[in-house]
Image (cartoon, rainbow, N blue to C red):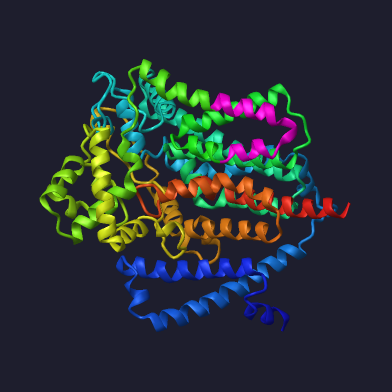
Amino acid sequence: MKILKNIFDIRKNIHVSVLSLIYSLLILFGNSYMKIGNASLVFNNYIISLLTLVGLFILARGIILLIFKFIDSYKIDENKKANRLISFFDRHPFIVSIIVILMLWLPYIISFYPIILSPDPSYQIKQYFGIPNKYSNYSVLIDPSVIITNHHPVLHTLLLGSCLKLGNIIGNDNFGLFIYSLIQILILSSVLSFTISYMKKIKISYIYRIVVLSIYGLVPMFAFYAISAVKDTIFSSLIVLYTILVYHLIKNRNITLKLKHLIGIILLLIFIILFRNNGFYIVLLSFPFVVLTNKKNLKKLLIVFILFFAFNYSYNKIILPSFKITSGSIREVLSIPFQQTARYVKYNDLDPKEYEIYDKVLDMSDLAKRYKPEISDPVKNKFNKYTTIDDLKIYFKYWLKDLSKDPVVYMDATINNVYGYFYPLKLNWYIYHDFDKRIVKDGFDYHYNKLSSSRKLLIDYGVNFPFIPVVGLISNIGFNTWILFLLTTYLISKKKYRGIIFLLPSFIVLLVCVASPVNTYFRYAMPYIFSMPVIIALFIDYIKRSELDEKK
């Protein structure tokens, strides 16, 4: 009866009420955009929508109150007795974890030998070997003979290309690709095993650690991305480590950092920006909070941040240009306005001047036809690479004018491109498994082995996993986003604001997803989805340790 009374008393636990309203609105509007691409289902049936909203709000509030009550009552039991097997796992968490993970991934490693190549890494290989490709064509090259660009991280391109070149030298391209696969597999499995080890260090229950280990080994997204040559796998591993680092620094504010610790921190920050261009923003927008809340090491961490900033500037403005390597096209950060312009053009008439301005930037000949609500690549692919800063200034002048004329079109264009990151019923599943022939056509001897039956079995499991009731939510983008909102709201309700800092990297990744060219694209959200098992463990530790400290 008490829980029912609390559900309907919306003034009590106002934070829960706000979160419940957000969740309810996301479901209501997400359903409309998924079905018809705009909010008409909400506004055309406003009475039904209002009743649905009230029902969703009550349901969400009740569930959230129960979850918060469970968190409040949860107690850390550090003295549970365990059998010999669990005790061995407890004594050797890293070694046991990496062995278990690799054993469970072995069927994928064997079946998809040497590696899964998707379009992007295939184009990176083309760049490495100087073969013409679309990404080189998108930019005005510093030197036409150097077609490697920083659209994809140069370090990742060099690593992938070097492994294939090594295989090429010894006469086996497949084995060269497998060398890269082994490197990536070891990186991801080691990082995931480290999370288990760190959970042991902060005394998270062995039951939770076993559950997480099972997730790492049995949920197919981990194994598939371990053997997929996309840049996001190593980058996601680095973000997992960075999340733990941020937590460790805000939790242990009274520990003096030594030189070796500072070197380790700066190396991690540098690798984050080397393996994905937007990694810079993740550190830029989160690390200052770590610096400001760690007074004992403030000067040291400030120096680390300055060195990080200096390296990023030197790398992009000095090092890459000195090797004639061109930066990625500016079009990559303009997905939102370009989609808005394309949708505006599709549903509105333009005057001759508008047409001329937009045509200079985006090619108006078939812009309306190129517009796809949930992916901006078709629009961006005809961006004029010779567009100047002045051209963009004029473009944005007209972009603002059209925004005032038809703001609803702009809103619809944006929401269509992002709603799946917040709406759990949108299921775009992006594990890579198809055989990509792009580099084969250029003479490389890349091929899968003859284990087609086992590949089919694993593909069927991977593709269908998100639809398995309850456990499928582990790989659901919107659901993982909701967990972030839930944890943040709980921390705010308990006035434990410092704890939000270790969630910042995940929230910034989410912001990057919002600005990305594709709706509900798994590998863009992968850093915070892969981090979620350890984020929950860090959250539990932070809440419960804070309570213990308050009682002392």
Residue sitting at x 41%, y 66%? 30
Residue 122 percent across, percent down from the top left: 33, 34
Residue numbers of the magenta segment: 286-308
Residue sitting at x 38%, y 30%? 174
Comparing 531 with 383, the one in front is 383
Residue 418 percent across, percent down from the top left: 39, 56
Q: Decide: is 18 above or below 389.
A: below
Image quadrant of residue 99? top right
Q: Decide: is 258 above or below 450.
A: above
Instruction: Verify whether residue 425 appears in magenta.
Output: no
137 displayed left or right of 218: left
Q: Decide: is 461 above or below 188.
A: below
Residue 164 percent across, percent down from the top left: 38, 25
Residue sitting at x 63%, y 29%? 302
Image quadrant of residue 113? top left
Residue extending farthest right: 552
Is residue 429 visible from the viewing direction of this image?
yes
Is residue 241 visible from the viewing direction of this image?
no
Q: Quadrant of the N terminus?
A: bottom right
Comparing 29 with 98, the one in front is 29
Residue 446 percent across, percent down from the top left: 33, 32
231 displayed left or right of 491: left
Residue sitting at x 85%, y 53%? 79
75 displayed left or right of 518: right
Q: Decide: is 25 above or below 246.
A: below
